[in-house]
Amino acid sequence: DTAVSQTPKYLVTQMGNDKSIKCEQNLGHDTMYWYKQDSKKFLKIMFSYNNKELIINETVPNRFSPKSPDKAHLNLHINSLELGDSAVYFCASSQILGRAGDGELFFGEGSRLTVL
Amino acid sequence: KQEVTQIPAALSVPEGENLVLNCSFTDSAIYNLQWFRQDPGKGLTSLLLIQSSQREQTSGRLNASLDKSSGRSTLYIAASQPGDSATYLCAVLPSGTYKYIFGTGTRLKVLA
C-alpha cells in the first residue's frame, strides 16, 4: 500500500500547454510538499501545505499553482509550460513540530515532466 | 541561513569495503537529520532519521551519527554490496520550521 503516490509518472507535452500532477498520502500527515529535482539532481522545495494552508511558497513563477483540497491531497498545476520546466517533480509528506510526529519525510516516486 | 554540504560528491569502492559518507550543516539548531537513498529514476527512500537529541541510529548494515555541535553527520555502510550503489542524500529540518534543507548528495558505486 503506497504511502505517497503521485500521478502521472511521466508527462511529455509541448511548450505552452497546461498540465497537472496529483499527489495523495495515506499516512495521516498534516504537511505535504512539492519539490523540483533538476538535471543535476539537486532537490529544491517549491511549496508546502500544512492542513490545507499554504505555509511555504518559494520563489516559483506564478505559472505554478498548488492546490490542497484536503490534507491528504496536494496537486500541482502548471500553466504555459516552458522548456525550463522539464524536471522531476516530487511530492512528499511529514508530520512534525510536536503534532505527535517525528518529522520523517516520505517521498512519492516522482513525476518526470518533459517539455518539447 | 542553513546550508547542507555532502562530501565527496562521488565515490567508487570495491565490494566488501566499509565506507563513510559525510554531511555537514552550518546551523546546529535542527529538529532532525535524515538520510535518504535515491536509485536512478526513482524517488527518495528514507534510510535513517536522527532526532536532535539522539547521537546515532542503526538499521542493518547502516549506522548514522549526529554531532550537532560540530554540524556533522556521517552515514557508515558496513560490508558494501553492489546493491548499495545509489545516490545518498542528507536533509536537515531546522528548528521551528517545516522546510527541510537538502545536501547535494553523494553518488556511490560499489564494484563487484
Image: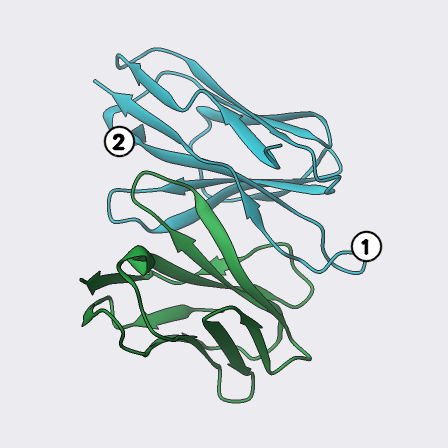
Q: Where B14 falls versus A21 (above or below)?
A: below
Mark 1 and mark 2: Cα distance apart in space: 37 Å
In percent of the image, x 45 and y 48: which residue is there?
B44
- Chain for disc number 2: A
What residue did someone put label 2 on?
A84
Q: Position of residue B7 (x, y in %)?
A: 29, 73
Horizontal relation, residue A30 to residue A35: left or right: right
Pick whichever of labels 1 and 2 is earlier in the sequence: 2
Q: Residues within 10 Å of mark 2 (few under 14, many from 20)?
A: few
Of the pair B11 and A24, the residue shown nearer to us: B11
The secondary structure type at the circle numbered 2 is: helix
Horizontal relation, residue A71 to residue B42: left or right: right
Rendered colour, chain B = green
Q: Quadrant of residue B16?
A: bottom left
Q: Where A38 falls versus B85 (above or below)?
A: above
In percent of the image, x 50 and y 44: which residue is there?
A58
Horizontal relation, residue B30 to residue A30: left or right: left
- In the picture, the quarter occupied by the C terminus of chain A is top left
The chain drawn in cyan is: A
In percent of the image, x 24 and y 25: which residue is there?
A83
What residue did someone put label 1 on?
A99
Q: Are marks 1 and 2 in contact (CB under 8 Å)?
A: no
Q: Position of residue A26 (x, y in %)?
A: 69, 33
- In the picture, the quarter occupied by the N terminus of chain A is top right
Q: What residue type is disc 2 on?
A: Gly
Q: Residue farthest to the bottom?
A: B69
Q: Position of residue B72 (x, y in %)?
A: 46, 81
